[in-house]
Image (tube, rainbow, N blue to C red):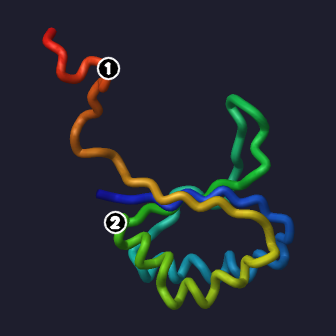
Amino acid sequence: MPAYLIIEAHITDPKGFAAYARATPAVVGRYGGHYLVMGGEQRRLEGEPATTRTVVSCWPSRDAALAFWHSPEYAAIKPLRDGTGTFRVLLADGVQTQPLTDTATEGTAP
């Protein structure tokens, strides 16, 4: 099952962040990931205005994403983003292979 790293980034030092942004894609690729969302326009359609940029990368599996995240190559470049903003990083599994069920009616007869 694919997995996704979803990053919300509030960049306060774009020049300082640039070195991290240049170095990361090659390591992502080495570990089997690729970007789905990075850069480009983000438009609010509903809710409060966003103060962050969103980056989404796709991975063949949760294990592949974690291998990247804990790799020595990423550990070497991650400090490049220190002091350049605040970041929230989420790891999410892809689409379930079984349909979702309604837990409110589960186990009741029709």
Work out which residue is located at the far left of the displayed protein and give it: 109
Q: Residue at x 46, y 78 (%)?
A: 68
Q: CA distance from mark 1 to mark 2?
A: 33 Å
66 over 106 or under it: above or below: below
Residue indicated by mark 2: 60
31 over 58 or under it: above or below: below
Q: Residues within 10 Å of mark 1 (few under 14, many from 20)?
A: few
Front disc: 1 or 2: 1
Q: Residues within 10 Å of mark 2 (few under 14, many from 20)?
A: some
In the image, taking residue 49 as reference, residue 54 lies left or right, namely: left
Is label 1 in contact with label 2 (beta carbons under 8 Å)?
A: no
Q: Position of residue 79 (x, y in %)?
A: 69, 84
Can you say which quadrant of the picture contains the N terminus?
A: bottom left
Residue 14: image quadrant is bottom right
Is disc 1 placed on a helix, strand or loop?
loop
Q: Closest to the observer: 110 or 17?
A: 110
Is disc 2 placed on a helix, strand or loop?
loop
Q: Residue at x 71, y 40 (%)?
A: 43
Q: Amino acid at mark 1?
A: Ala
Q: Position of residue 21 (x, y in %)?
A: 68, 75
Q: Position of residue 46 (x, y in %)?
A: 69, 29
Q: Residue at x 79, y 67 (%)?
A: 85
59 over 82 or under it: above or below: above
Q: Earlier in the sequence, mark 1 or mark 2?
A: 2
Query: In the drawing, what numbered circle is on residue 104?
Result: 1
Q: Amino acid at mark 2?
A: Pro
Q: Residue at x 30, y 26 (%)?
A: 103
